[in-house]
Image: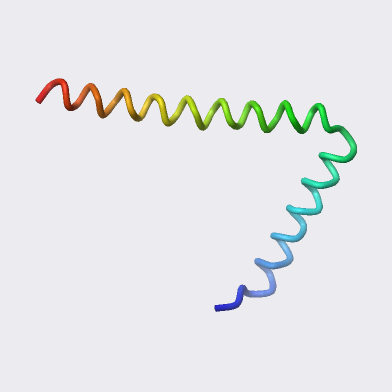
Amino acid sequence: MSMPPVKKIVMWLVVIFLLYAIFTSPNDAADIVGSAWDVVSNAIKNIGEFFDSLIARS
């Protein structure tokens, strides 16, 4: 199944922008990725704590 042309164009624009951001300011790009990773890891940890709490109440 092929992507519609609009999705391909948007995907390439995002990739080009990410590469541009990495090449022009790698430290800032690394900080952004690190912050995003912290958000994802905290979300996973909090979801785990939520389900642990549900199991403990049963």
Residue at point 73%, 53% (across, down):
14
Color style of the picture: rainbow
Q: Position of residue 35 (x, y in %)?
A: 63, 26
Q: Quadrant of the C terminus?
A: top left
Q: Is residue 40 left or right of residue 35?
A: left
What is the quadrant of residue 27 in the picture? top right
What is the quadrant of residue 55 in the picture? top left
How many marks overall?
0
Q: Quadrant of the N terminus?
A: bottom right
Give 4 or 56, whichever is nearer the viewer. Answer: 56
Outermost residue to the bottom: 1
Q: Is residue 53 left or right of residue 39?
A: left
Outermost residue to the right: 24
Q: Position of residue 56 (x, y in %)?
A: 16, 21
Q: Is residue 28 left or right of residue 24?
A: left
What is the quadrant of residue 25 in the picture? top right
Residue at point 38%, 25% (across, down):
46
Q: Position of residue 11 (x, y in %)?
A: 69, 60
Residue at point 85%, 45% (across, down):
20
Compared with residue 23, is residue 36 higher up or lower down, i.e. above or below?
A: above
Compared with residue 48, is residue 14 higher up or lower down, i.e. above or below?
A: below
Residue at point 63%, 74% (across, down):
4
